[in-house]
């Protein structure tokens, strides 16, 4: 979500979660309400625990089940993002415990939690700066709610055909779905790369 940008093996930008928010989150989860949460680190990720709902999501998304670690161990070191399995109704109270972070939702069952000031838009800027490319020459592809700022920001924002209507409204062009050669279709539409 823009907080960790790499080119090859070179890290060109990273923005981790504030440690005080991580401490506050652990306190909230221990004292108020626990929920499954994936903690994304630089080279690995962990979940504090799984349940039937998380396992079903992993199956639906064809996502490997992360290894489990106790909550306090999972937050050790730099954490760049959370995939937090809380509902929209729970979100306000949980995010109040993390005032320097924000939640973006692309699925009703979980949110991506990132540090404020970090987004895919920021990631686009870091990559463009690194390669010396102007914003007008950029194209971004996305299909989730967390892609909206990037789609609006890029020179051309392309929503995948499987994206929700909300995401599609923020794009310059809507292509076919992810599994239907959507990227190739868009590149052909814009006459990019000899396609």
Image (spheres, rainbow, N blue to C red):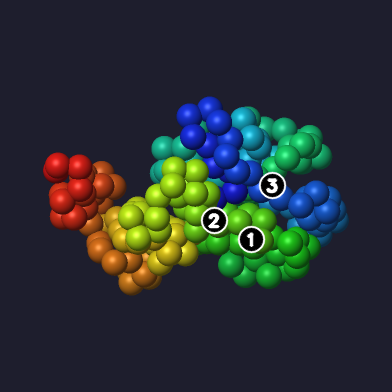
Residue identifier under label 2: 122
Q: 18 and 8: which one is in front?
A: 8
Residue 159, quarter of picture: bottom left
Contact? badges 1 and 2 (CB < 8 Å): yes
Residue at horizontal 29 percent and vertical 66 percent from the top: 172
Mark 3 vs mark 2, CA separation in Å: 13 Å
Residue at horizontal 73 percent and vertical 40 percent from the top: 78
Q: Is residue 31 above or below residue 193?
A: below
Report x, y in % for residue 171: 33, 66
Mark 3 vs mark 1, CA separation in Å: 11 Å
Residue at horizontal 52 percent and vertical 61 percent from the top: 105
Residue 71, quarter of picture: top right
On screen, residue 172 versus residue 14, left or right, reads: left
Residue identifier under label 1: 117
Label 2 crowd bin: few (<14), some (14–19), many (20+), radius 10 Å = many
Lower position in the chain sequence, tag 3 or tag 1:
3
Report x, y in % for residue 132: 44, 47
On screen, residue 62 versus residue 123, left or right, reads: left
Lower position in the chain sequence, tag 3 or tag 2:
3
Report x, y in % for residue 194: 14, 42
Secondary structure state at the residue bearing disc 3: loop
Q: Is residue 110 visible?
A: no
Q: Is residue 133 above or below residue 164?
A: above
Lower position in the chain sequence, tag 1 or tag 2:
1
Label 1 crowd bin: few (<14), some (14–19), many (20+), radius 10 Å = few
Question: Which part of the image, by quadrant, shows the C terminus?
Answer: top left
Q: Nearer the viewer, mark 3 or mark 2?
A: 2
Give the number of the disc on residue 16.
Answer: 3
């Amino acid at each position: 979500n823009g907080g960790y940008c790499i080119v090859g093996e070179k890290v060109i930008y990273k923005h981790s979660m504030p440690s005080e928010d991580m401490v506050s989150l652990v306190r909230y989860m221990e004292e108020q309400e626990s929920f499954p949460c994936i903690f994304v680190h630089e080279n690995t990720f962990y979940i504090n625990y799984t349940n039937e709902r998380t396992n079903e999501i992993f199956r639906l998304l064809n996502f490997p089940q992360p290894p489990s670690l106790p909550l306090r161990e999972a937050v050790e070191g730099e954490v760049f993002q959370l995939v937090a399995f809380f509902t929209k109704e729970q979100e306000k109270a949980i995010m109040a415990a993390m005032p320097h972070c924000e939640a973006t939702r692309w699925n009703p069952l979980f949110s991506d939690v990132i540090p404020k000031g970090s987004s895919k838009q920021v990631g686009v800027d870091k990559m463009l700066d690194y390669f010396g490319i102007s914003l007008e020459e950029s194209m971004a592809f996305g299909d989730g709610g967390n892609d909206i700022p990037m789609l609006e920001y890029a020179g051309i924002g392309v929503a995948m055909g499987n994206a929700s209507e909300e995401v599609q409204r923020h794009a310059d062009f809507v292509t076919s779905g992810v599994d239907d050669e959507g990227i190739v279709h868009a590149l052909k539409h814009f006459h990019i790369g000899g396609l």
